[in-house]
Structure formats: C-alpha cells, structure tokens
Amino acid sequence: MTENRANGTAPVTAPQHSVDGFVKEFLRELNFGQGVTLERASVNDQYLALARTVREYLMARWLETVRRQREAQAKSVAYLSAEYLLGRQLDNALIATDMTDIVEEGLASLGIDLGTLREQEVEPGLGNGGLGRLAACFVDSLATMSVPCIGYGIRYEYGIFRQTFVDGWQVEQPDTWLSLGAPWEFPHPEDAVTVHFGGTTEKFVDEDGVERSRWIPAWDVLGVPYNYMVPGYQNGRVNTLRLWSAQATKAFDLAIFNSGEYVDAVRAQTFAENISKVLYPEDSTPQGKELRLQQQYFFVACSIRDFVENVLPEDFDLHNLPDRIIFQLNDTHPVIAVPELMRLLVDEKKWDWDEAWAVTQKCFAYTCHTLLPEALEVWPVALLGKLLPRHLEIIYRINDEFLAEVAQRYPGDELRLRRMSIIAEHPERSVRMAYLATIAGSKVNGVAALHSQLLRDKVLPDFSEYWPDKFTNVTNGVTPRRFVRLANPALSELITDAIGPGWITDLARLREMEPLADDAEFRERFREVKAHNKERLNALLERRDGITLPADAMLDVMVKRLHEYKRQTLKVLHIVSLYERIVSGELDPATMQKRVFAFGAKAAPGYKMAKQTIGLINHVGRTVNTDPRVRGALTVVFPPNYNVTLAETLIPAADLSEQISLAGKEASGTGNMKFALNGALTIGTDDGANVEIRELVGDENFFLFGLLEPEVEKIVASGYRPSAYYEENPLLRRAIDLIASGAFAGGDRSVFEPIVSNLLHEDRFLVLADFQSYLDAQDRVDAAYRDTEGWTRSAILNVARSGFFSSDRSMWDYIDRIWHSQPLVAR
C-alpha cells in the first residue's frame, strides 16, 4: 500500500469490537482465508486466521492514517535501517487495539487457548542486536506519538541465523521465519522499483547545452515492497514499515529452459534474490563484501525512489523536499543514499549541482552507533566503482568541493585535509562512509551522553571542530509497550494499580512510584512479581531447552551480542574463579549466595574469538553444573538462539544486569535500560548509557566498577602488559591456569589456548586490568542481595527512576534537536 493508493478511497469500517464480533470474523477467516473448518484446523491454521483477524482491526486505522497524512502533507521521518528486530507481532497488535481480553474470551469459547497460538508465531529475525531492536522501538514510539513515519529496510528471506549448540559450540542454521506463512505483511509487486548496478558512465551535452553525466548500468534487479503495519498504542494511528525484497527483472528464460539448461534458465532470478536472501552475509570474502554493498544500495535506492514517486504528490516541487521529509541514517549502512539522492536530482531531474547539494544536505541526518574504528564502514574505491560508478563520481565531487572549503579555512594544513577527506588513501583507496554522512547530514548524533562526547572528541574531532553545532546527543530508549507492558504483565499490573495506566505512554510518570519503595507491603508485592517472573522463565526454559533453574537463587544475566569489547570473558573468569575457590576449599558452597548465571548471545559466523568464548562458557557450565562439590551454589545456563521472544521472559526475571563493557567502547546499550525498567540492579562500568542510568538511579542502587575512559586511554598509551596482572593477582592466575589446564575440555590444553593466549598477551579490552575491581563489586552484590528488603527497595527505585529511558523521550529529542517534524493528531 503506497500512500497514493489510499487517496480517494471510501472509509473502511473495522470489524465489530466485541467477543461475538471477533468470533464471527475469526471463523470467517478460518473458513474462507485458510480454507478449513474449525474441527480440521491445525494450530498453524488457527494462528494464521487469528493474525489476519486481528490485523483487520488495524487496517481501517492504517488506511485512514495514510489518507490524513497525504491530505495534510506534513513532514515525515523516513527511517533508513538495514535492521528491524521486530519481535512477535500478535501481542503488540492486541494491546494496540485493546483486544487481548476479547480475543482470549472469544478463542476460549471455541476451545482454543490464546497462549498456544502465541507460541506458534515465529518472530522475524531481521536484525542482529541492539541496532535493529532500537529501530523497532523507534518506529513504535513514532506511531504512538502520532508522528508521520515510514520505516524502510530489507525483507531478508533468512534473517539472523538460528543458533544451535553442538557439544557446546555454536552452529548456525538458516532462520526460516517465512516457512509457515507471514500474515502481518502486505506484498505489492505492482509497485516494484528497478535498481541498477555496474556498467560505466559517459559525458554528454543535454538539449540546453549543459554537460552532464549518464550512467549506463550493466544489470538491474527489482525491489518488491512488503508493507507492515506499525500501530500506535491505542491512539488510532498506524504507520508503515516498508521492507524490500529483491527479484530478477527477467526471472525465467523459456528458450534456455526448453533447451534443457534448467539451471541457467533461472540463473538471473537466483542472482537477484541473493541480495535479500540473508541478513549480513559473511563478508570476509570479496564476494561477501560485494553482496553487502549490493544490499545497502538496493534498499536505499528503492526507498528514495518510492518516497519521491509513490508517497509525494505527482506535482510536488522537489525544491521543497526538506519540508516534507528527513531521511534518518541508522548508522553507516544506508549512507549510500546520499549520492543516490544527488544522482536522482542532478542526472534525472536535470538540476544544477549546487541546488541539488543544498537540498540534499537538509534531507539527511546521521546517527553513529559505535566508537570502534572497525565498525565505521569503509568501502574500497575499486569495489564501489565497479558496482556504482556514477555514485563514486558524485562522492569524488562532494569530497573535492568539501576539501576546497576546508583548505580555505585552514590554508596550508595538508594533514588536516588528509584526515578529513572522504577518500582514505591507506592502506587502500577507500570511501569512508561515516565522513560522507557527516558532511552531508544536517545533524550528527551519538546515542548516549558519554558516547556523543567521545564521538566529538575522539572519533570525528576535526568535523566537530569544523561544525560544532552539527553534533548533538540523543540517548537511546526502549519502548515501554513491549518491554514492560507486554514482557512483564505482572509488574505492569502492579504499577498501574499504584499510579494508574498513564505511564505506558508517559514513562516519566514512573517517578510517582518512588515513595512506595519505603512501603513494606508494596515491597512484598514487588518480590512476588519477581518470583512469579522467575517461575515463568523456568517453565519456558524447561519447555524450550530442557533447562531447570534452581529455586532461591539470584538470577545474574548477561545477554547481548557476543563481542570482545562487551567482555563476556570477564564474566566467565568470575565464574571460573568462584568455582576454583570452591574446589580448592576456600569457599563453602553451603554458605554462598546461590547464583544462576544466564547468558544469551550470538557470535558472527566469521568471528573466531567470539565463537571460542561461547564454547568456553558452555564447557565451563557443563563442568560447574555437574560437579557435586558445587552443590548447586553456582549454575550456568546458556539457552541457544537468544532473541526478542526469549528476552521478553528472561529480562523481567533477572535480579542482576551485567553491563561490563570496557569504558569508552559501548555506544549506549539498550539492554541495560530494559533490565533497570524491569527491576534488576546493574553491575557495570561507566560506559555508554550506564553513566546516565547510574546518575538517575543513584550510586547506592548501582554496582560500579572498573577503569574510567581516561584511565583506559592512559594505560593503553603507556603500554598495557596484561601478563603483569596475571602475575600479581593470585585469584586471576588460578582462574586462567584452570582454563589453560584443560579442566573444562576433558584435559585437552589446546582447546581454549587461543583465549588464554589472547588474555595474557593482547587483551585489547583490558579484561585482566578490571578483573579485581569486578570481583570486589560482585562481593558487594552478594552482601546487598542478602538484605532482602534493601535489595527490593533498590530494585523499585531502579524502575521508578528509569522513565527517562523511554524511546518516546528519545523521539521527542530527535524531533526537537534534529527533525523538527510534528505529530499529526487525529481531528
């Protein structure tokens, strides 16, 4: 459904909002949509019928939203993101329509359990972690706030891989999320967009005597849009998420097929579909890098073309484009959109370069999500020129004109020109996409206060000096609808009983709970909620993975993408140290605070050290969990295939949130916010949004440890020698020696030698330097947890003081500081 399709249509009437009305619609969908009777329907038939019935309650609002937006011509946000980690859609649609009770009662009258149908839904794995989940939170908030928005991305046929463990080691399997049907999407092949690749460029003189460039592409693909509804929370607005699927322009050659060359007959189709086949294909090979760049250009080319040709009115003057749209670049993946818009304006619309550049600079804003240099995308000139020759020419000109301006302000400063050039000359000639985004963007933002400061001072210092007003901060947030209201119904009910339901769309109101931290009866009810959530988690893990959690244990959770800077290894060393001290007789398991250490993480398929770390965690867990000397004091669990669905049950049950990245490496984090909002206390470094969490919840309700960012920089600059910490700290030495001995690998010392050698000789992220501080903080955790009333009070205050971390607040910050768009409230 493109926006012009809704123009002039008659009003669409939603189904009757009652139990009888729902049952009638559900049975109709089951009979005439699935083609089965109730008696013969499978669970999947029932789920698909339910999903389509519920979506009908949203569709009238969706069509009306599109109509009003087209009529008003209000400024929109186009969120360009390579990832959207959406989670399951059914429950979100139910709370948006306020239909949960109606549906539950209606299905029960037919002998169907809503919970069973919930379990049938497979979440779209269209993201890898925080970046994709943040995009999903943001589009949810914009709909809830009635802000016009279109999310644009890729409909990957196979999302992030499904993780399994074989003998403790990660094995990746395809994520076949589409195999049982996709009832929440609306395909529109008639609105397909043609995207070109390769070829050459040539100069020519147009009919007005102006010299121009012409792109002569070598091949092309079709981008087919699939629309998803993004409902606001009970406000009548439904925005659109538009994901693109790649298809061949000439999918099937009958002549070749009839000659017997069956594979060759569909070769074009296979080649084209590879573009949207899988999220983040392995890019350690030249072919993988080329496919990644194809993906990025494919979806932004489709999106810009779609907005200009299908969303805007036919007579729209593109000189006014900045008044109608802001394209938000979610990290560097969509930055090739900048030269694509320039190409459209200069080559296709025949604009002068300067007027095109003036418009383009007002249409983009860039969010940087990293402080790691290796995460700032750089594309080899040879590859970019091969795939997108015209775009490379445009980038060269943008760079030449920008450097001329820099040279005028800083005459004779050749080193500055080299530092600020979009084109890097070493180690190979490459295009620095973050630089292009910074030069073209109207604003550049980091995603937490510390991150934004380091972005200015360390990552892009020359640019922040050149454009001090271009840089700003917008601290990330999470949607309270999914991560409290849906994920934690027991806590949601407790909060609503205490302060009313308004907090769901105004999370700052959680502050009204603060006095209740001193109410003994409320603390008891809060503990009952946590105990209920632990029981719920235990039931899920037993059903899902055959994992049984011990009772009366602290739940200590570390869930996030597996990367060395996030320091899962530090957590493992803590566990190994505790285990070694039990085995050596130094600690008595009978008097220890019982802990369950829960991990959830996926390692990128080509990231060997991350996969080694997963193997170590699982092998340590196997040893600890089966050693009778431990007597249940320590339990390590690592359920495979951590995703949004599992997070919605695990996070509400957690007592302790592990946010232990090396200071200065985590941009923000959003898991830390989800845990605090659900009543877990944080042990963490002063990194990312941990800084703001600690400031808001109070030092006494946060377990701080580790080096500060300036101290990290000083140690690294002075020549960090990790082996010195090993030599000087007996507990650390004993833990590492136990791993090195092969104790967790059947006596084979070679299995985890890469981790041991990395820690002793490289340790890029200062695990050993922070080890003792971390152990000291964990001792404080144990002492605090033994004070049940004090711990509960701190947990309540974490919830009450974390309302700042709503993605609604993040969106208001974007609107105020970057987008300058406004809500479009229903009349």
Image (cartoon, rainbow, N blue to C red):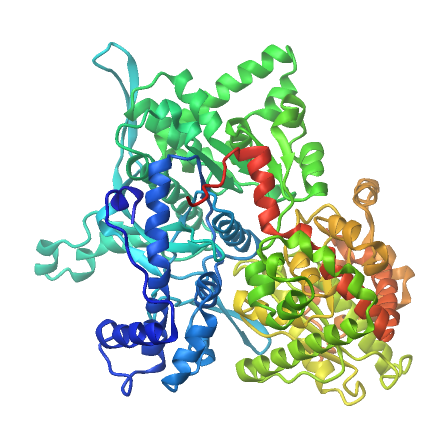
In the rendered view, tell whether residue 466 sits above or below residue 550.
above
Give the mark count: 0
Residue 519 location (% of width, % of height):
82, 69
Name, please, the residue furthest toward the bottom: 628
- In the image: residue 143, left or right of residue 548: left
Image quarter where the C terminus lies is top left
In the rendered view, tell whether residue 676 sits above or below residue 556.
above
Q: Quadrant of residue 319?
A: top left
In the rendered view, tell whether residue 366 sits above or below residue 488.
above
Toward the viewer: 439 or 259?
439
Q: Quadrant of residue 370?
A: top right
Residue 428 at least partly seen: no
Toward the viewer: 738 or 61?
61
Residue 6 location (% of width, % of height):
27, 46
In the rendered view, tell whether residue 131 sits above or below residue 338.
below
Residue 551 location (% of width, % of height):
73, 85
- In the image: residue 203, left or right of residue 319: left
Toward the viewer: 580 or 114?
114
Q: Residue at x 28, y 88 (%)?
A: 39
Q: Residue at x 34, y 78 (%)?
A: 46
Residue 822 at least partly seen: yes
Residue 744 location (% of width, % of height):
71, 77
- In the image: residue 438, left or right of residue 277: right
Q: Residue at x 62, y 78 (%)?
A: 537
Toward the viewer: 799 or 786?
799
